[in-house]
Amino acid sequence: MRFAMIGCLGIAIAILGLATPALSQNRPAIESRFTSIASADCVEVGNGGDEIDFVDYRCPGPNGMSVDLHFHDSLYLALGFNGTQVGSTMLSSNRPSNWLVDWRGRVENGVFRPLAAIVRVRDPDWSEDHSGSYLLVFGFGPHPCLLGERSGPRANAEARTLADTGHC
């Protein structure tokens, strides 16, 4: 009797093991789309006028998504997505315009659906952590969240892996 149960269990595991790849093959592969967050490619949505030194931009992303940039004191940058600021870390506003956002997602029914975004940033020049650029990886669950950061020679590959597998 024990052997019969083990045999049935083995068959069930084998069927599930064979079914899993088939199910994942039906799911579209994760791919990238790139958009700019250079202020020239974005729309100004607010500023502090003469009283407070800040300006806010909304930059278009795929499928109605947006990246929100909040520049403060002409030095600092805070990031958000779709009107939600993610974290409170202030980043350097000094960034090249060719640092694009890498949106990771799937094409479903002909529409790219972002699952995550990767943004290259750097810490403010005065920061003790100022050591060049690094990648922030954001996920999109019920609300945008910071999944982590990656730096070093394998940063791009590691950031994409985190973006593709992370969850908010």
Image: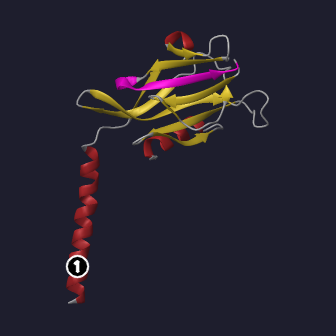
Q: Residue at x 39, y 42 (%)?
A: 142
> 95 or 81, which is in the foreground?
81
In which quadrant of the rendered image does the N terminus lie?
A: bottom left
> 35 or 91, which is in the foreground?
91
In this rendering, position of residue 46 left or right of residue 1: right
Q: Quadrant of residue 62?
A: top left
> According to the image, label 1 marks what residue?
7
| Residue type indicated by callout 1 | Gly
What is the x, y in percent for residue 79?
56, 29
What is the x, y in percent for residue 103?
44, 30
Quick check: can you spot residue 23?
Answer: yes
Q: Per the image, is 69 magenta?
A: yes
Q: Is residue 135 above or below residue 5?
A: above
What is the x, y in percent for residue 160?
49, 38
Q: Per the image, is 106 magenta?
A: no
Point out the residue furthest to the front here.
51
Quick check: can you spot residue 36?
Answer: no
In this rendering, position of residue 6 left or right of residue 95: left
Q: Is residue 32 above or below residue 16?
A: above
Q: Which residues are magenta?
A: 62-73
Q: Quadrant of residue 7?
A: bottom left
Q: Is residue 105 above or below residue 37?
A: below
Q: Residue at x 68, y 15 (%)?
A: 51
| Secondary structure at numbered mark 1 | helix
What is the x, y in percent for residue 37?
53, 19
In this rendering, position of residue 10 left or right of residue 73: left
Q: Residue at x 62, y 16 (%)?
A: 48
